[in-house]
Image (spheres, helix red, strand yellow):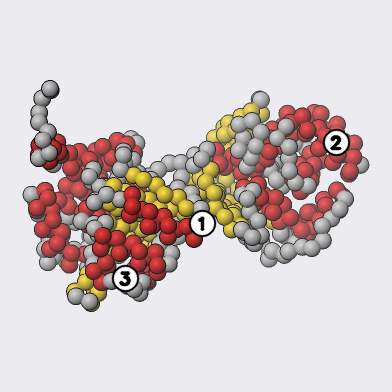
């Protein structure tokens, strides 16, 4: 159906329930999760005849955003099917029918997501997917004319051939099938509803919904739909970077020449130091392993004197509470990406990190690692199943060895809902030769940097940053987490005021009033 239908048997299976996800004019939609982990949207019930009416209204296309036009639509369906009961039932269920049509039309406070509206409004969900149908998709040339033919066509495709889409609700990586079933013949309408600008000349597009802070991707070729919600920005979390070694160390022990299997928060701490030194950090992994999440978390550890320039395709996924430190460049298409990457350097200061949401091509990788040659750091993510595959793509990008030097590759993985660091490797350059090494091989340079900057050795600095990350994970909100990291890592250890004062005095500034 085009809206969520939950009969009494399905409602009785509810285990966890949330009431009033959508409420309007005395009509409401509830949601629940069953014990067998099905996500159930409980729209108000209406008779089968009215369900059929809504189905045909959708198939015929555009719902006017003025509810004064709704009676005409319903009446035309009743007359076309020669079913007087539809009109009588409409009068009895008028408020409910208008409530459901409003959600498709985008009237009043609705966004026009129809059957997906409740899922969009549920903050628990992180993603909504409409996957492939249970049967192979077929493209049809015959378009039924009469309402009766249209109804028979939809029912045949759905019931006889099994061509329908079941909407899936996603919480992190847990996939919950829903009771929302969309007949295949209606998928074109649903996809166009989500992305009206889709055409056969531009069959694959992504847009950002600023209301729900979600990225919506769809296509007209196979009717794939993915809605990724980004309304809750991640803050540093100890749970998302779990140790990948069975023996946990009491404290970071990385020292010059020492081999040590880094644990999750140690990886982030080490990466933050390398980023200060204008190194390159690549988060690699398969889909759903937390690459973008970890990139966002690393940005929390941007020192106060550095600027971050973010380059993304379309919807915004990279974010951190960097007050006055972050510039965001969003490009509408792939061909504009090069302009944005070039512009990123023009926006940059002498201490800049360029963050690319995802590096997909050798050219993009080469551009990023070359930022090191201009004195900038780089951050990105990459789809790769193993660290070996990621390293191969990076080293074959034909970047100069000096640009690759100091690149850290963090391979992420996931088991069930648990995300963890699987492997960490570094790239170093010796002359024209590029080598893949353990992170411990970077420690001489890292140790020299933290000694000159903070007056402690690398082991101590790692301990400080791991402790800061652990405490930030307990903060109530992103801003609090950022402030805590700022204080523990920089503000309580570096007298930035004195630095500014000393430099200003060199240009004739003096203390006191005129």
Which x, y percent locates residue 508? 10, 35
Q: Nearer the viewer, residue 230 or 82?
A: 230
SS class, disc 3: loop
For the residue carrying disc 2, how many other residues have a C-alpha within 10 Å: few (<14), some (14-19), or many (20+)? some
Residues packed near mark 1 inside 10 Å, few (<14), some (14 to 19) or many (20 plus): few
Q: Residue at x 22, y 45 (%)?
A: 305
Q: Residue at x 51, y 48 (%)?
A: 215
- Number of other residues with Cα within 10 Å of mark 3, as a class: few under 14, some 14 to 19, many 20 or more: some
Question: Closer to the camera, 191 or 267?
Answer: 191
Q: Quadrant of residue 118?
A: top right
User: In the figure, is residue 417 to the left or right of 9?
Assistant: left
Q: Can you tell which mark lies on residue 399?
A: 3
Q: CA distance from mark 1 to mark 3?
A: 24 Å
Helix or strand or loop: what does disc 1 sit on?
loop
Q: List the residue tagged with mark 2.
A: 75
In three-dimensional space, the C-alpha distance between marks 3 and 2, rounded to whole angstroms, equals: 67 Å
Rendered image quadrant of residue 491? top left
Q: Which residue lies most toward the right here?
A: 82
Residue under pointer 1: 333
Residue 307 x/y as whole percent: 29, 47
- Which residue is found at the position 70% from the left and 35% from the top? 65
């Amino acid at each position: 159906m085009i809206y969520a239908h939950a009969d009494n048997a399905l409602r009785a299976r509810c285990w966890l329930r949330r009431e009033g996800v959508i409420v309007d004019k005395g009509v409401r939609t509830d949601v629940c999760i069953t014990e067998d982990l099905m996500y159930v949207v409980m729209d108000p019930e209406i008779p089968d005849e009215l369900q059929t009416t809504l189905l045909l209204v959708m198939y015929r296309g555009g719902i006017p955003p003025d509810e004064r036009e709704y009676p005409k639509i319903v009446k035309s369906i009743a007359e076309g099917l020669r079913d007087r009961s539809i009109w009588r039932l409409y009068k009895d269920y008028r408020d409910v029918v208008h409530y459901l049509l409003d959600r498709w039309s985008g009237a009043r406070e609705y966004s026009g997501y129809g059957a997906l509206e409740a899922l969009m409004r549920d903050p628990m969900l992180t993603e909504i997917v409409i996957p492939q149908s249970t049967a192979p998709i077929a493209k049809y040339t015959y378009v039924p004319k009469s309402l009766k033919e249209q109804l028979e066509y939809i029912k045949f495709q759905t019931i006889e051939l099994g061509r329908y889409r079941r909407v899936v609700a996603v919480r992190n990586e847990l996939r919950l099938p829903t009771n929302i079933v969309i007949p295949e013949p209606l998928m074109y309408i649903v996809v166009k509803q989500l992305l009206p600008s889709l055409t056969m000349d531009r069959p694959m597009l992504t847009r950002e919904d600023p209301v729900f802070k979600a990225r919506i991707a769809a296509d007209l070729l196979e009717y794939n739909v993915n809605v990724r919600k980004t309304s809750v920005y991640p803050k540093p979390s100890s749970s998302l970077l779990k140790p990948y070694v069975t023996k946990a160390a009491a404290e970071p022990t990385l020292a010059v020449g020492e081999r040590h299997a880094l644990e999750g928060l140690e990886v982030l701490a080490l990466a933050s130091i390398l980023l200060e030194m204008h190194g390159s950090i690549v988060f690699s992994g398969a889909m759903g392993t937390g690459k973008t999440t970890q990139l966002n978390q690393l940005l929390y550890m941007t020192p106060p004197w550095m600027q971050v320039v973010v380059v993304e395709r379309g919807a915004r996924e990279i974010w951190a509470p960097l007050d006055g430190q972050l510039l965001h460049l969003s490009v509408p298409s792939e061909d504009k990406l090069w302009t944005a990457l070039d512009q990123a350097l023009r926006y940059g200061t002498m201490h800049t990190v360029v963050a690319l949401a995802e590096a997909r091509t050798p050219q993009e990788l080469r551009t990023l690692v070359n930022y090191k040659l201009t004195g900038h750091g780089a951050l990105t993510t990459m789809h790769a199943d193993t660290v070996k595959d990621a390293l191969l793509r990076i080293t074959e990008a034909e970047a100069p060895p000096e640009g690759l030097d100091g690149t850290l590759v963090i391979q992420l993985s996931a088991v069930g809902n648990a995300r963890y660091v699987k492997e960490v490797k570094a790239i170093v350059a010796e002359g024209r030769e590029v080598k893949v090494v353990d992170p411990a091989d970077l420690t001489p340079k890292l140790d020299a940097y933290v000694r000159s900057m903070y007056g402690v050795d690398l082991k101590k600095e790692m301990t400080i940053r791991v402790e800061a990350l652990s405490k930030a994970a307990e903060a109530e909100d992103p801003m609090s987490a950022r402030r805590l990291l700022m204080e523990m890592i920089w503000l309580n250890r570096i007298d930035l005021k004195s630095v500014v004062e000393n430099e200003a005095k060199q240009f004739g500034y003096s203390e006191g009033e005129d």
